[in-house]
Image (spheres, coloured by chain):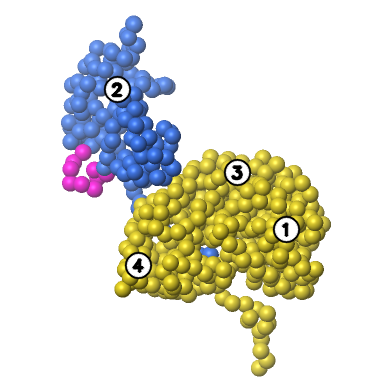
């Protein structure tokens, strides 16, 4: 049941719990309990909203920053990752296999704001060897949702 | 001028769906629950194979019976899912949708005046196809109290000396009924004893929500007297690709292939390449879509229960078939008023046979969001009708 609940709320966290129980063919109380348990276990980490900021008047830039670092004895990458993710403007920090170590995503009001974060804060950290900053120009699809097109039902309205 | 038309064709009634289609098409903002095809797009990896085949210039005819790769994959699939062994070379034909397979199977099997048993409510094409094959369609009226399954007794009662073929349309459009193994075993006994044949239309086989679909062809002694029909439209959301198949005994398939060869030549090549991909790598897609349909099915049954609308629990296809007899109007009147007053289109049960009177076919090939809006309107409508009745 857990996987099914998760796969549904991952796409629609606002679903009514009674309805969730109905479509899964289980009791509402079981859904409520299961979700509470998953929240407690940290499986469900939050209920966020997908927003296409492009369509608002808010100015925002998002950057993906590749960071190469020197891992520290006994700490690996955890220590440096923590020092980066504690900045509130940092959206996500991933440890990556391949050509660099950490992928940091960052939101700022302007290119200037992001670049000053990178030059003043990120690249000055002791263990950071180098950074490469990529700005996102357009989001086509995010979290499994296509942002550029709206679904239209083009089927014939009645077919046998 | 002489009458240019064939009486037999003129006498065929147009589909009962047509009338509603015309009204709905005129209405700008109508919501429809009348669609008999998936709301999903064909999974991208399948579409991509179709596109790739075009890029490669594979725009030729295939052999009449279909691409070898596809026939092999079809046989692998039936072995894997149903445990039936078919010879890809002699017992398999790729057709233009399941519809063509129904047509050529009937034409290959019946002589003038022989009887074809058609359980109803069922898909609209069996009766006309039987008539066009010069057979006599004999309708078996399925009953709500049997959950619209075919019983051995109903079958026995319908069989005469002239009976040649039984059409077995399960999982069923429009009722959503399925036939489980024990039901099929009873039917198989009668079929073998009375020495008739079966055309088993299993186009909705993958959309079964109670256990796994069982094909009558997998029962002992039945493979040699069954034409199994399936296709890609419903399972893989590929209706527009027009691709189905028939599998059956060599003696029948040889004759079906002649009709197919002269009437059709071969099924669309692009679709055949895409279908190979569907069978090879599409199991996960089918599973996901089935789960989504099943969720909507549960939602509708719950909603009907809430509004006190009688409906048996269907375990197949993507239709529910609620009963509206309590309102004292015909299916068509109900559907007509519902469309005009609430702008929601459903299909009257009578479009699928007279015994569909008193029922509606509601499709759940729509997103839950859309279903919720439509069901909200149904609730309002039903309550209004009940109030009218009180007065």
Residue A30, compared with residue B193, is above or below; it is above
Q: CA distance from mark 1 to mark 3?
A: 20 Å
Disc ID at residue A131: 2
What kind of element bears circle 1? Answer: strand
Counting from the top left corner in percent of width and height, residue B386 is at 35, 67
Could you say which is closer to the camera, residue B190 or residue A82?
Answer: B190
Residue at mark 3: chain: B
Q: Earlier in the sequence, mark 4 or mark 3?
A: 3
Counting from the top left corner in percent of width and height, residue B306 is at 37, 54
What kind of element bears circle 4? Answer: helix
Image hue for chain B:
yellow
Residue highlighted by disc 3: B212
Counting from the top left corner in percent of width and height, residue B179 is at 62, 52
Nearer the camera: disc 3 or disc 2:
3
Callouts 3 and 2 in the same chain:
no
Could you say which is closer to the camera, residue B102 or residue B371?
Answer: B371
Left or right: B365, with A51 as reference point = right
Q: CA distance from mark 4 to mark 1?
A: 44 Å
Residue highlighted by disc 1: B198
- Categorize mark 3 by other alpha carbons within 10 Å: few (<14), some (14-19), many (20+): some
Q: CA distance from mark 4 to mark 3?
A: 39 Å
- Mark 1 vs 3: CB contact within 8 A: no
Q: CA distance from mark 2 to mark 1?
A: 70 Å
């Amino acid at each position: 049941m857990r996987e099914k609940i998760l796969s549904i709320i991952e796409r629609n966290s606002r679903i009514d719990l009674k309805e969730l129980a109905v479509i899964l063919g289980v009791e509402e109380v079981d859904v409520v309990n299961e979700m509470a348990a998953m929240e407690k276990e940290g499986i469900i980490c939050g209920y966020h909203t997908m927003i296409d900021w492009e369509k608002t008047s808010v100015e925002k830039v998002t950057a993906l920053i590749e960071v190469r670092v020197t891992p520290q004895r006994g700490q690996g990458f955890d220590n440096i990752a923590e020092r980066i993710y504690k900045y509130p403007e940092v959206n996500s920090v991933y440890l990556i296999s391949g050509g660099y170590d950490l992928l940091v995503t960052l939101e700022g009001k302007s290119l200037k704001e992001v670049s000053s974060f990178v030059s003043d804060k990120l690249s000055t950290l002791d263990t950071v060897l180098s950074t490469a900053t990529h700005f996102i120009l357009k989001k086509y699809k995010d979290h499994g949702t296509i942002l550029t097109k709206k679904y239209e039902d083009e089927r014939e309205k009645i077919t046998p | 001028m002489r009458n240019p038309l064939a009486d037999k064709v003129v006498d065929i009634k147009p589909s009962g769906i047509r009338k509603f289609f015309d009204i709905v098409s005129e209405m700008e903002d109508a919501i429809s629950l009348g669609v008999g095809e998936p709301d999903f797009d064909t999974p991208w990896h399948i579409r991509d194979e179709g596109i790739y085949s075009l890029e490669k210039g594979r725009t030729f005819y295939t052999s009449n019976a279909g691409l070898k790769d596809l026939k092999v994959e079809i046989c692998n699939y039936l072995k894997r899912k149903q445990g039936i062994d078919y010879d890809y070379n002699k017992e398999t034909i790729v057709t233009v949708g399941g519809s063509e397979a129904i047509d050529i199977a009937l034409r290959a099997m019946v002589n003038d005046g022989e009887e074809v048993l058609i359980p109803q409510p069922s898909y609209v094409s069996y009766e006309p196809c039987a008539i066009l094959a010069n057979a006599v369609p004999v309708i078996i009226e399925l009953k709500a109290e049997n959950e619209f399954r075919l019983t051995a007794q109903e079958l026995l009662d319908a069989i005469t000396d002239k009976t040649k073929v039984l059409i077995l349309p399960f999982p069923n459009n429009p009722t959503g009924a399925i036939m489980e193994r024990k039901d099929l075993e009873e039917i198989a006994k009668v079929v073998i004893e009375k020495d008739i044949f079966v055309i088993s239309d299993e186009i909705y086989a993958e959309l079964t929500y109670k256990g796994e679909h069982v094909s009558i062809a997998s029962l002992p002694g039945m493979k040699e007297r069954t034409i199994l029909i399936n296709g890609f439209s419903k399972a893989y959301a590929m209706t527009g690709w027009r691709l189905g198949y028939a599998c059956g005994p060599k003696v029948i398939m040889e004759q079906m292939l002649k009709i197919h060869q002269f009437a059709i030549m071969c099924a669309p090549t692009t679709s055949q390449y895409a279908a190979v991909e569907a069978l090879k790598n599409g199991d996960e897609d089918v599973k996901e879509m089935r789960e989504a349909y099943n969720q909507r099915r549960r939602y509708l049954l719950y909603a009907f229960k809430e509004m006190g609308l009688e409906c048996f629990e269907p375990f197949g296809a993507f239709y529910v078939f609620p009963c509206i007899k309590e309102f004292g109007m015909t299916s068509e009147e109900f559907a007509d008023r519902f469309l005009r007053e609430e702008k929601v289109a459903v299909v009257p049960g009578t479009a699928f046979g007279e015994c569909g009177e008193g029922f509606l076919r509601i499709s759940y090939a729509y997103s839950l969001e859309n279903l919720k809006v439509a069901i909200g309107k149904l609730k309002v409508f039903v309550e209004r009708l009940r109030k009218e009745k009180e007065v």
